[in-house]
Amino acid sequence: MEKTEHLTMTARDGFRLAIQVSGPPEAPPLLLLHGQANSHEWWDGLRSEFEPQFRTVTFDYRGTGGSRGKLDEFGELSTASFAADAAEVLDHLTISHAFVYGTSMGGRVAQMLALDFPDRVSALVLACTTPGGPNSVKRPREVGQSLARLRGREHTEYLSALFYTPEWAVAPKYSKLLGDDTMSSQESAAHLRISANHNAWDRLPEITAPTLIIHGDDDQMNPVENAHLLHERIPDSRILIFPGGRHGFFEEFAEVITPEIVSFLTESGAS
């Protein structure tokens, strides 16, 4: 397993971003974009499976992990501004273009990266995500109400059930997908707004990168209908629906999902 290198950089507006890089320096770069209110640790159990084929790159979104500061001093945050951060991370690492794999809110950020910086994206994988806006399919009302109402252990267990099937044997406290518990309530609320305000619907047909859309068909956090909408809107995209998969299907069934992603990216050509 490759050792992860931890770096920091100063973004265009002075905000400090934490970056993590692992894998062979000579391998094609793969930018991994994690979900809402989570840090790069989202990828801890997954990134090594992309090596040695790829040099994996992650960074902590503003308000998570090692990328901390007063968010309200740096203007309005959005999936587009996080995509601009991602482009600056690639600049800092002197990476001209990369494969991009985004999950959940990371898939929203990945859409904006492919739209606003098309030359930077060699190929795109969008997992358990949504186009956003009024044309997207919202999660069931009772799911949103439960997430807002429950606290402590009940909230964690409910969230875990949204991510994993009952067959998943790992206790919720060991999951890296259920949130960065170092975040303040203000930081978590900011991430919630960023996700909720995403709307790439009108621009999705502009995406030119080869695109794979993957989703579990039992995802109540982000209904699978959104995968079909993305597939319809993004030209020449491919779609893979995993039976029985919930929001964390890409981790629970990584032994099946990860090879599919690696195969797609390899077929898309060297970065």
Image: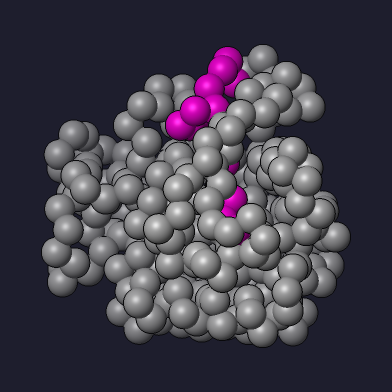
Q: Is residue 234 visible?
A: no
In this rendered view, identify the residue nearer to me: 264 or 154: 264
In this rendered view, identify the residue nearer to me: 41 or 216: 41
Q: For this view, does 70 lie left or right of residue 182? A: right
Could you say where residue 254 lies in the image, as x and y percent from the top left? 37, 72
Q: Quadrant for the N terminus, please.
A: bottom left
Classify residue 164 by image quadrant: bottom left
Report the magenta residues as a range: 55-71
Q: Quadrant for the C terminus, please.
A: bottom right
Classify residue 188 by image quadrant: top left
Snapshot colouring: one colour
Is 243 placed above or below 25 here? below
- x 82%, y 72%: residue: 208
In this rendered view, identify the residue nearer to me: 232 or 113: 113
Asked if residue 81 lies in the magenta stretch, the reply is no
Classify residue 17 by image quadrant: top right
Is 109 placed above or below 167 here? above
Q: For this view, does 271 lie left or right of residue 177? A: right
Is 246 placed above or below 58 here? below
- x 49%, y 28%: residue: 66
Q: For this view, does 16 lie left or right of residue 51? A: right
Could you say where residue 119 lies in the image, as x and y percent from the top left? 85, 60
Could you say where residue 268 lies in the image, as x and y percent from the top left? 71, 80
- Tell how many labels: 0
- x 67%, y 15%: residue: 73
Could you say where residue 103 lies in the image, as x and y percent from the top left? 51, 59
- x 46%, y 31%: residue: 65
Q: For this view, does 245 lie left or right of residue 271? A: left
Q: Is residue 173 visible?
A: yes
**Which SS does the magenta portion mostly show?**
loop
In this rendered view, identify the residue nearer to me: 26 or 163: 26
Asked if residue 56 lies in the magenta stretch, the reply is yes
